[in-house]
Amino acid sequence: DSASLVPAGALKVTPGHSPPDLALARAHGLPLLSVIGEDGTMCPPGGGWLQGIHRFVAREKVVAALAERGLYRGTQDHDMTLPMCRCRCPYPVPSMSPSRD
């Protein structure tokens, strides 16, 4: 049956960004990596070809790379709750690091 050939999907786990992901990572022995630096640029664990590039530019490059290989399947908008820090950062990055407020 062809349905059994369809991948079930993927789960993105970012242990340093949320308590539930941190708990999941610890339960499965996953390393705690940070791919986006405090300045919003990509760090080495995010891929050498993206290192030093701002996260929004990196997103465009990843989409382009997927499209070049015929792997990009589109983008969908979705509702989400985005908590803001006290400093009212324009694009806060969730992080498990202590607050500097």
Image (cartoon, rainbow, N blue to C red):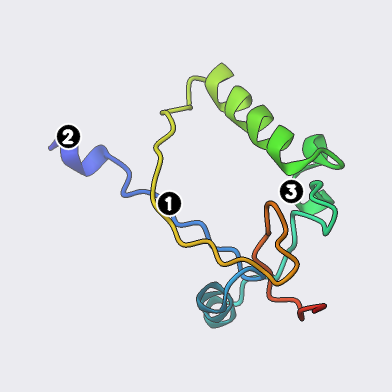
Q: Which residue is mark 2?
A: 2
Helix, strand or loop at disc 3? helix
Position of 37 compared to 89: left or right? right
The amino acid on which the numbered mark 1 sits, given as a three-letter code, is Ala
Mark 1 neighbour class, 10 Å CA radius: few under 14, some 14 to 19, many 20 or more: few
Q: Position of residue 16 (x, y in %)?
A: 67, 70
Between disc 3 and disc 2, whose residue precedes? 2
For the N terminus, the quadrant is top left
The residue shown at (77%, 53%) is 45
> As shown in the figure, which amino acid type bears the numbered disc 3?
Gly
Seen as rendered, the residue at the extreme left is 1
Residue 94 placement: quadrant: bottom right
Q: CA distance from mark 3 to mark 1?
A: 18 Å
Eye-nearest disc, 3 or 2: 3
Label 2 secondary element = helix
Describe residue 68's horizontal placement relative to residue 9 as left or right: right
User: Mark 3 highlights which residue?
Assistant: 46
- Residue 20 pos. (x, y %): 50, 77
The residue that mark 1 highlights is: 10
In the image, 80 versus 66, the foreground residue is 80
Q: CA distance from mark 3 to mark 2?
A: 34 Å
68 left or right of 37 in image: left
